[in-house]
Image (tube, grey):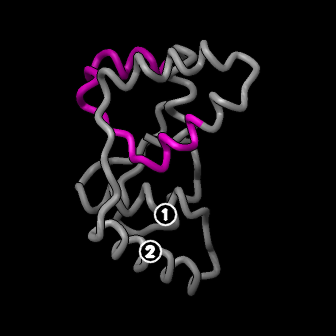
Amino acid sequence: MDTNHVSELLRDREPLASRFRRHGPHAFVLVTQVLGELYGGAFGGTRRQENLDKLDRLLEDVGVEPYGQEHAERYGMIAALLRHSGRPIGAVDIQLAAMAMSLDLTVLSGDKHFGYIPDLRVENWLI
């Protein structure tokens, strides 16, 4: 899940929250980079403890996937492809895409730039 989806899930926004419950929380993983963005938002917000508590509750049910060498290699391939096509995107999003492709997962995101990455499966549950 990309940060935009997790943020909305932590706010219990529909239709995302219903779909998440329907699939069961153990059907989802976070990558460590997205988790870092979420912690950055929680620590930087005005409701720090409330947001940290929500994130901790989510982490009880959702797995966190560590970043490894296979993902780094895939990252390099994707970054080079995007750079050569004139469509670079942020490093965290490339890392998310690399991990999803390596693990044969679908990325949940509202960001259209994931469409620049061939063979990446993306769904937007925010609409």
Residue that lies at the very extreme toward the bottom in this rendered image = 84
Tell me what residue is drawn at x 56 percent, y 28 percent.
7
Q: Is residue 46 visible?
A: yes
Quarter of the figure with residue 37:
top right
The kind of secondary structure the magenta stretch mainly shows is helix
Q: Amino acid at mark 1?
A: Ile
Secondary element under disc 2, as helix, strand or loop, is helix
In the rendered structure, which segment of residues is drawn in magenta? 14-39
- Tell which of 57 and 100 is nearer to you: 57
Q: Which mark is residue 78?
A: 2
Which residue corresponds to mark 1?
Answer: 94
Q: Earlier in the sequence, mark 1 or mark 2?
A: 2
Quarter of the figure with residue 99:
bottom left
Q: Is residue 12 above or below residue 78?
A: above
- Magenta segment: does it hold 69? no
Dot 1 and dot 2 residues touching (CB under 8 Å):
yes
Q: Is residue 25 above or below residue 79?
A: above
Q: Position of residue 93 (x, y in %)?
A: 52, 57
Q: Is residue 100 above or below residue 71?
A: above
Q: Is residue 14 visible?
A: no
Q: Position of residue 56 (x, y in %)?
A: 43, 21
Tell me what residue is drawn at x 52 percent, y 14 percent.
12
Q: Quick one: quadrant of the N terminus?
A: top left
Residue that lies at the very extreme toward the right in this rendered image = 46
Q: Which mark is residue 22?
A: none
- Tell which of 65 and 93 is nearer to you: 65
